[in-house]
Image: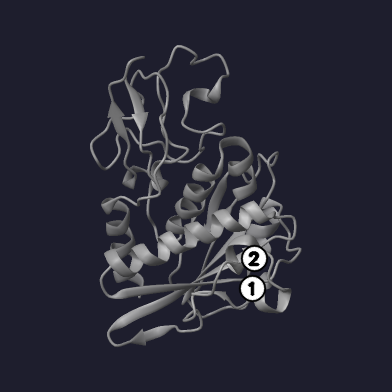
Amino acid sequence: MPGGDAGDGTAPPERRAALGNADAARVGTVSGVDYLTLVVHVHENCERGDVRAATAAARTVVEGMGDRVDGYGLSWTLAVPTAWPADRATLRREWQSVVDSRGGDAVHLFLVNAPGDYGNGYGHRIERVGDGDGATVANVGAARYWDGPAVARNIVVHETLHAFDADHRDGTVAYEKGDDGPAYADVSPMATAYVRYAGPECGRGVRACADTTWPGTGRLPEAFSGGTPNGEPAAGVRGHTDRVADAAWGSVRTWLDGVR
């Protein structure tokens, strides 16, 4: 793995396209392991902090895939920042013209820095990896602006795993007692933006009773994979963790076994 260039965004453009895992060009089956590539496409409006959050998230996904999903490997590469269309409808329609297709061996992650873009929200899946490449969007700039780097990293992991068919219910959340009452804690990536709680401020437009400033608009799970009910009375949320839940890796494995 190269040094700090991928994290701080200061490498010259001709080098940025090659940053990431040194094996990023390796695809196909090698020694019984089916390899894929995560290609991180950086919009030219993204900032250094966005790239840093995405780099940390990519490493989390790559390491988790290797450790937790038998028979599959993932490498990642950071593309040179470009001005691809960031509008949700346009990108969904035209994303394949933006990328170099890898014949179903890649997931293309489009990074956006748009704190006021309610169309993209924090992100969304365009296509699952399958017969062709997968594609997903992470508005890392919005997550970082509204909720900080921990949520930004989780959102990137969250949207990437959506391309492998992981779902919101695959997340984990702790429900703990505290001095000011029970609270949610340790929100994992697939649960991020989908935790709801019945706090005293609910219905008054404050944080929308969610773990993030922008609550997710997808399917809301009644309970997460660890058995924690969603929507309990709580004083709030006490932080996020980038540890991907076992259930999410299980969904990734099931999906890949069905399409590879």
Secondary structure state at the residue bearing disc 2: helix
Give, as a three-letter code, the residue at label 1: Val
Residue 24 on image: x %, y %:
50, 79
**Residue located at (40% from left, 23% from top):** 197
**Residue located at (41% from left, 33% from top):** 195
Q: Tell me the quadrant of the picture where the C terminus can be found.
A: bottom left
Give, as a three-letter code, the residue at label 2: Trp
Looking at the image, residue 38 lies above or below residue 22: above
Secondary structure state at the residue bearing disc 1: loop
Residue 251 on image: x %, y %:
31, 57
**Residue located at (58% from left, 62% from top):** 7
Question: Mark 1 and 2 residues: CB-CB less than 8 Å, in contact?
Answer: yes
User: Counting other residues with Cα less than 10 Å from the Cα at mark 2, is it few (<14), some (14-19), or many (20 or more)?
Assistant: some
Say the numbered circle drawn on residue 99. 1
Residue 210 on image: x %, y %:
47, 28
Q: Is residue 81 left or right of residue 63?
A: right
Say the numbered circle drawn on residue 95. 2
Q: Is residue 139 visible?
A: no
Identify the residue at the far left of this view. Answer: 227
**Residue located at (33% from left, 70% from top):** 66
Q: Is residue 15 left or right of residue 143?
A: right
Give the Cα distance between marks 1 and 2. 7 Å
Q: How many marks?
A: 2
